[in-house]
Image (spheres, rainbow, N blue to C red):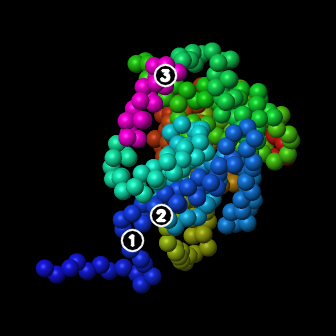
Amino acid sequence: MQAPMLVLKSNSKRESGRKVQLSNIKAAKTISDVIRTCLGPKAMLKMLMDPMGGIVMTNDGNAILREIQVQHPAAKSMIEISRTQDEEVGDGTTSVIVLAGELLKVAEPFLVENMHPTVVIAAYRQALEDAVDIMRNEIAVPVDTNNRDEMIKIIKSSLGTKFMKGWNDLACGIALDAVRCVHLEDKGGVKEIDIKRYAKVEKVPGGSIEMSEILDGVMFNKDVTHTGMRRRIENPRIVMLDSNLEYKKGESQTNLEFMQETDFRKILQLEEDYIRNICNDIIAIKPDLVLTEKGVSDLAQHFLLKAGVSVIRRLRKSDMNRVARAVGGQIVHRTEELKEEDVGKECGLFEIKKFGDE
């Protein structure tokens, strides 16, 4: 019987058996030792330089491991553990790496004594079940999520080792209020807290940390397209669009050939009529504010300004989704399809003002 042929790169090397097991443990211990000093209230900050030349100072395990480039498969698995912990729990990224490194370190003598890895794994699984059982039945205490003081204590336990611990009360209050702001509960009692899509951290240069605040609404760094438009509207009717408020351009190179002088005026008139019809579709709904993900031409601004409508253009898709959730409207792709139920009516105040240096 012919032996199987392996096609590998010229610089590849293949290892197997006990040597690989000990190599994996060594790589995992190396990753663990890198962030061991970042654990606890006396933790030290690590200074990292990213590929773009930016400097990051942090003692967050996941933030540090995210910047580390490794080739060893076991070391990559350790980094994945930290990433999973951050996504599922949001805290304990350093602890989980240090704990994993110690578990592998304790398992190493058993492998050296030729104990099979599956036996060690079975023992660890049994220990996990016992630990979960003890935590659930003997250590865990019920928490009332409506009790603000209890929730603040839990959040403080996560921020106690971070750089923000000097502003603990402010940061914990902002974090709790932000989660409560995006929290939804349907009629069946199912809770939805999607902080990735609906909670946004907006960084504004200037000012101090004490000026940080939670906004019960949606914020974006934009201004109205025309200086004559209103910058403060109470209880506005909001229309959200995913279309251009300008004449259509050819998708590829377009050439127009004019035979007479009046032909050019006809083209200009067609463009103006097209913009006018789009604006009339919008004005017929009687909105106070129009938000669009695309551009707005000067002519469209003119027509909408005359109708007393404020316009903000080139918003991100994620921001539009937040606005739609907050004000209760629908994002519309064609102005001729606008209906009364597409208008957002649950906004209490639209206001443009300066924060910090912006």
Q: Secondary structure at mark 3?
A: strand
Classify 275 as above or below 320: below
Does the rendering let one see residue 335?
no
Q: Earlier in the sequence, mark 3 or mark 2?
A: 2
Q: Report the residue at 42% width, 65% height from top.
A: 20
Left or right: residue 316 compared with residue 252: right
- Residue indicated by mark 3: 185
In the rendered structure, does residue 23 fall within the stretch colored magenta? no
Residue 241 at x, y percent in the picture: 55, 44
In what quadrant of the picture does the N terminus appear?
bottom left
Q: Amino acid at mark 3?
A: Glu
**Label 3 vs label 2, nearer the camera:** 2
**Residue that carries the numbered disc 1 in the rendered image:** 15
The residue tagged with tag 1: helix, strand or loop?
A: loop
- Predominant secondary structure in magenta? helix
As drawn, 150 above or below 31:
above
Q: Which residue is mark 2?
A: 23
Task: Answer whether labels 2 and 1 touch (C-beta < 8 Å).
Answer: yes
